[in-house]
Image (cartoon, rainbow, N blue to C red):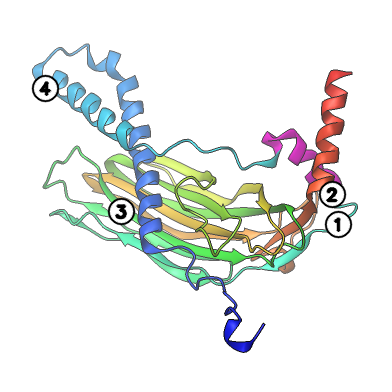
Amino acid sequence: MTEHERQPERSAPANLITESVVRRVVDERRVETELALLTDRLNDVPELRRDPGAKVNDYIDGLVKRRAELLQRRPRATAASDLRARPVESLVATLGHFFTPWVTANLPYFSEGIDETPGVAGTSGSIASSGLFPGGVGFGGDPQDSGNVQPSTEKWWIHNWTCSYVFPPAPFSGWLYYRFTTDTSCAIYNAPAQSGLVNAFVTIGKTSDVLAASPFDPGAEETVGWPFWVTLPQTTLRFFDQVPTPVSGSIQVQAGKTAAIGFIYGVIAGIANGYVQFSWGSMGTRLTLPPGTTYDGEVFDKIEYRFEPDWWVNVVSQRLQAAATS
């Protein structure tokens, strides 16, 4: 091949998680959050029906209408990314390390995602970053709603952060297995809002080829965890100390292709007529450790991965099928 015939070597895009992707994920998480609130309130309808006043009926009708609207926007269901949900891959992941060790990867720094405030008269405060770290973030917040506008309706504050890791090119066609745990901490120490909630979410996406797709493209598999979920008002201190969200999954890969994983960590607060204050918040990624293993600084800001060839996965699958039919 002559010099002018050579094709330039393509590299992974610098930003695997675009703003439009983050906005879509944020909207999905907020819809899920509001749906959960409305469902709780509709479960209380028998109690409300004891007061047959027109205002009560209007309130219930409003809940039903809003719930129908949100159901239209509800995110599509995605397959579970936990290896335990798939027997073949779970067995491969369990046995494979005897032949191919897990590789430890250091995560880059998290970046700011989107910081949204209600923009409604009488609202103030924010969910703010207190630090961006390799594999994690720190945060706190003081969202407030004076109740001047629709005092019984939640206004929404959302802040999230993003990170991605590009794996080495696949040495052969097969599967890439990964595992890690996200630890979340937060102290909610003052929350006299009329109603609402505060929660945190962990959303993980993946792609088998960073040159062809983003980890969060429509149709890409996602894992969602909710490390804490606190409804308001709260009259006592709520402290969450390193709540673990274990994540494990796999990516089907082709030889020479470059897979990647994406992280979106976030906090949502919905406040109606009042405020909430929280601090000492953090979300950090670490290695998933066997029970009884002592923590040390070497386990943080890291994930593990391992490549397994197609033939090995097929052997395990055939053995399982034979055992099931024997």
Mark-to-mark CA distance, 1 and 3: 45 Å
Q: Amino acid at mark 4?
A: Lys
Q: Nearer the viewer, residue 31 or 159?
A: 31
Report the mark closest to the observer, 4 or 3: 3
Q: Which residue is mark 3?
A: 157
Helix, strand or loop under label 3: strand
Report the mark closest to the observer, 2 or 4: 2
Mark-to-mark CA distance, 2 and 4: 62 Å
Q: Residues within 10 Å of mark 1 (few under 14, many from 20)?
A: few
Q: Which residue is mark 1?
A: 100
Q: Is residue 162 above or below residue 196?
A: below
At horizontal 86% and vertical 39% (from top left) the residue drawn is 315
Q: Which residue is mark 4?
A: 55
Which stretch appears magenta? Answer: 84-96
Q: Residues within 10 Å of mark 2 (few under 14, many from 20)?
A: some
> Do labels 4 and 3 touch, CB within 8 Å?
no
Which quarter of the figure is the C terminus placed in? Answer: top right
Say which label, 1 or 4, has the lower sequence index.
Answer: 4
Helix, strand or loop under label 1: loop
Q: Decide whether residue 89 is among the magenta residues.
A: yes
Mark-to-mark CA distance, 1 and 2: 6 Å
Q: Is residue 194 visible?
A: yes
Q: Amino acid at mark 3?
A: Trp
Query: Quarter-wise, where is residue 102 in the image?
Result: bottom right
Q: Which residue is mark 2?
A: 96
Q: Position of residue 7 (x, y in %)?
A: 58, 78
Query: Quarter-wise, where is residue 63 in the image?
Result: top left
Q: Decide whether residue 39 is among the magenta residues.
A: no
59 vs 208, left or right, is: left
Q: Position of residue 281 (x, y in %)?
A: 48, 59
Query: Quarter-wise, where is residue 54 in the image?
Result: top left
